[in-house]
Amino acid sequence: MPGSISFAEIMSLAGYLSRYEGGFIEKNYLSDEGISLKFRKSGLESSYLHFMENKYLFVSQENQVEGRKNALPIENLPVNKVRQLGTDRVLIVEGPRTIVIELMGGGNIFIIQDGLIVYSRKPGKRGGNTLKVGEKYEYPQYIDLRSEGFDFEGAIRTSSSDPIRTLAVRLGLSKYANEIDCALGHRFRSNSDILASMGELKEKISEIYSGAKEGKLYIYGDEFYVWRSFCRSEEPEVLGIEDGLIKALRNNVPEGTGKIEAMKRNMEKMTIEMERLRNIGEFIMEHLEEIDRLIRKGKGADPEKYKIDYEKGTISFVESGMNIELDMNKTAGENANDYFGMSKRIKDKLSRVRIEPAVEEKKVEMKRVKRVFTNYRWFITSDGNLTIAGKDAETNDSVVKKYLGDKDIYFHADIHGAPSVVMKVTNPVTEEGIGEAASFAWCMSKAWNSKFENGSVYYVTRSQVSKTPESGEYLARGAWIIRGKKNYVTHVNLELAVGFQKYENRDYVVAAPISSVHGRRVIIIPGEEKESVVKEISDFLGVEKEYIYPVLPPGTCSVRERVVS
C-alpha cells in the first residue's frame, strides 16, 4: 500500500533511536489518538517517539500527543537496546521493562517485565492465546533473512503464489518485493526465476539493510523507501529518517478536499477529547469531597466499581458515562487541574490550526490568564492582603502549615464544613479587609450550597491555632484547635464577584467579595445551575471555562448582575 511503513523503515528508525541506548525514557504521554515516548541521554537533544492511531511511527523534537502524562509504567525507564524484529513491523525498546510496538494486526503496544505483560493498549491474539495484562507475552513468529539458518530456497519452492507475492510474504519483503523485481529488470515471471537469481536477490536484500542503516528516506509523493527507488523515474526528496517519516506520512494524506476533510476529522476527534477531559475535570470539581474520600480510601473502595493499579498509582471508575482515572498521589483538586490542563493544551493546539485561509475572528478576544495557588481558592483584600482558603481536608491542613505566619490572621466560618482561611498580613489591616476575608470564608463554606444567609465567621491570631487536642479529644483531618478568645464578624451574606485581580503583576480570575473586585465582573449568588453560569461568566469575561470552575464556591449558583466597569 502506498505510504505504508515496512520493516526497513522501522529498522532505520530503530537505528536512529539506538543513539539513546544508555539513556532513558523520561516521560510518556497517552491519548486516544496515540502514545508519545520522550527519549533522553546526556549530551544529546531529546527526541519523542510517536505511535499514532496504532499504525504510524515517527520521531520529532516536540511532543505530538496532547494526553495524560506518564500514564504508562515506564517513567524514567533505562534504555538498554533498540531493535527491529526480522522483517516484521515490530519495534522493541529493551530495558528493565521492554516496550514492544507492533504495527501489524491492527497495531498494539505492550510493556513487558520478566516475560509478563504489565500493560497493553488493547488485548491481542497470538497462536490462539490472548495477550493481556498478567499473561506471558509471546513474540510473533518472524522471518530473519540475516539468520544463517533461514532457508531461502525452501521458502520459495514451497510457495504457490506468484513471484512478487512470494517475495513479499514468504521472505517478508513487503513493498520491496516489487522494488527488487524492478532492480533486476522484471525477470521474475515465476518462482523458478527467483531461484535462478538467488545470488542477486541476496545482494539486493543486503542493500535494503544497508539503506536502513544509512538512515535516509527517499520520498516519492505518497511512497517512500530506504533506498533510491528502482521502479520510479522521478527524483525523490531525500531526508533523514527523523524528518522523512513525518514528511512521508503527511504526503500520504490526499491533497485538496480529502486533506481538508482529514484535518477536520482530526480536529473533531481532538474537540471530543478536549470536551471529555474538561467534563471529567468539572465532575471532579463538583464532587471534591467525595473524590478526596475515594482517593484516601484507596484499596478499601468497592472492587466491583473501582479498579486500582498499584503500579501506576491510579484508581479508575466509570461515572456518568465517563472513564475517570485518578492519580492516588494527588488530591482531587490536583487531579481536576491535570484534566483541565490537558483539555486546555488541546484547545491551544486547535486554536493554531487554520483549515481555510479566511477565518472569522472571535468577536470577544479571549484573555490569556494563568492560575496560581492552584490547590486553593484565594483573593486580595481591598487593603492589599493575600487571603487563601483550603478546598478540602488536605488543603485545610496545608494552607495553615504553609501560609499562616506569626503576623497573619486565621478565619473560619462558624459552620461545619468550612475551609481554613489565612490572611497574609503584609499591609495594615483595615475593618473592610477583615469583613472581606470573613465574607470569603463564609461563601466558600457549605453555607453557600445550603443557602444559609446572615452567617458568622470568627478570626484569631497564629498563636491561637494548634494541632494538639486536649487529652481524650480526637482531631479530624483538616481540623485545627482554636484556643482563647475568638473575634466574630456577623451578618455575612452569600454573594461574590467573579472578575480579575492582579498578583505579582499578572491578571488572575478570582471569586471574591464584591468590594475587592473592580472592573468587568459578574456578581453571583447561590442558585440551581453551574454549567450555564460558568459559560455565561466565561463569555462575559472572555476567559476559558477551565479558569472559572476552580475559583467558584462549592455547589451551584446563579448570576445576579453583570458589571461592565
Image (cartoon, rainbow, N blue to C red):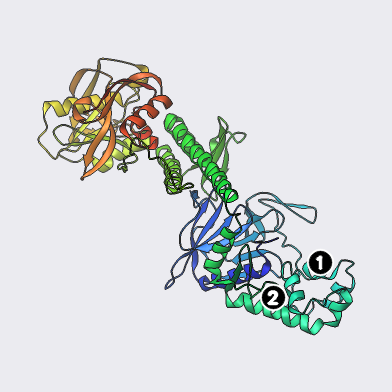
Query: Disc 2 vs disc 1: which is toward the camera?
Result: 2
Q: Nearer the viewer, residue 369 or 540?
A: 540
Q: Is residue 477 visible?
A: no
Query: Residue at position x 44%, y 33% from top?
Result: 282
Mark 1 neighbour density, 10 Å: few (under 14) some (14–19) many (20 or more): some
The residue located at (68%, 76%) in the rendering is: 208
Relative to 520, does residue 151 appear above or below in the rendering?
A: below
Residue 9: image x %, image y %?
Answer: 63, 68
What residue is drawn where x is 24% and y is 30%? Answer: 520
Q: Quadrant of residue 554?
A: top left
Other-residue count near label 2 (Cα within 10 Å), few / some / many at <14 / 14–19 / ≥20: some
**Which percent across, then down, holds residue 376?**
32, 37
Q: Which residue is mark 1?
A: 165
Check disc 2 and give the amino acid type. Phe
Distance of mark 2 from mark 1, alpha carbons? 18 Å
For the C terminus, which image quadrant?
A: top left
Q: Answer with left or right where residue 504 lies relative to residue 262.
A: left
| Foreground of the two, 336 or 208 | 208
Q: Give whichever of discs 2 and 1 has the lower sequence position.
A: 1
Residue 151's label in the rendered image is none
Q: Residue most toward the left? A: 428
Secondary structure under tag 1 reads: helix
Q: Quadrant of residue 407?
A: top left
Along the line of sight, which residue is nearer the eye, 443 or 192?
Answer: 192
* Type of amino acid at the residue the image marks with label 1: Arg
Q: Position of residue 323 (x, y in %)?
A: 56, 37
Residue bearing the label numbered 2: 230
Q: Examine the rendering and report whether any part of residue 344 can be seen.
A: yes
